[in-house]
Amino acid sequence: MSRLDLTLDPKTSAARRIEVITGAGGRRRWSDEEKARAIEESLSPDAVVSQVARRHGATPQQLFTWRREALRKAAESSPPFVPAIMEGVGAAERAPKAETSAAAVMEIEVGDAHVWIWRDADIGMATAILRALQTASRAK
């Protein structure tokens, strides 16, 4: 045989199935607005992340990554401390009376919300609450 036959099954002459993919190939790109809509939808209390991701043409892993990136960007863009205005004695007088011996040392007003920070408050918890209030007041 002088000719080299490279087929595995040379006796088969029937046509085989060929799939033709049309359209843009490669990875899908989502705009920041599309990502923001998907993130917002996924944060609702009754949302199922896999269903939200499917509706937006993404995987749950992608949606979780978008959420993580959005949180990181929000943390980088916000100041490490929320600006606060300290008032004189009046602020302490308006503070709710605590059952414990710790006295309110600072009142912070963010939009319509008032927060009293106690002397023995956990700094991490206080910072998280203030950031949440700041984010909520920006959204209004």
Image (spheres, rainbow, N blue to C red):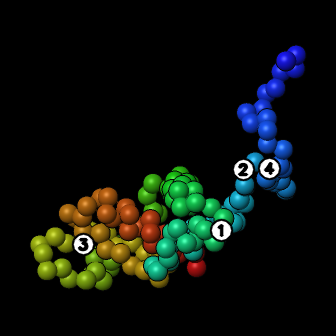
Residue 49 image position (x, y, % from top left): 51, 69
Residue 27's mark?
Answer: 2
Percent position of residue 78, x then y: 52, 58
Image point (38%, 63%), residue name: 128
The alpha-carbon separation of the residues under discs 2 and 4 comes to: 28 Å
Percent of width and height locating residue 115: 35, 75
Distance from label 4 to label 3 (Cα)?
A: 79 Å
Residue holding disc 4: 16
Q: Earlier in the sequence, mark 3 or mark 1?
A: 1
Quadrant of res 7 = top right
State the residue position of label 1: 56
Q: Nearer the viewer, residue 9 or 20?
A: 9
Q: How many marks?
A: 4
Outermost residue to the right: 2
Q: Is residue 50 visible?
A: yes
The disc, 3 or 2, on the residue closer to the chain's N-terminal end is: 2
The residue depicted at 80 percent of the width and 49 percent of the height is 16
In the rendered structure, which amino acid carries the disc numbered 2?
Arg
Q: Which residue is mark 3?
A: 104
Number of residues whose C-alpha sits closer than 10 Å to that of mark 4, classed few (under 14), some (14–19) or many (20 or more): few
Residue type marked 3: Ala
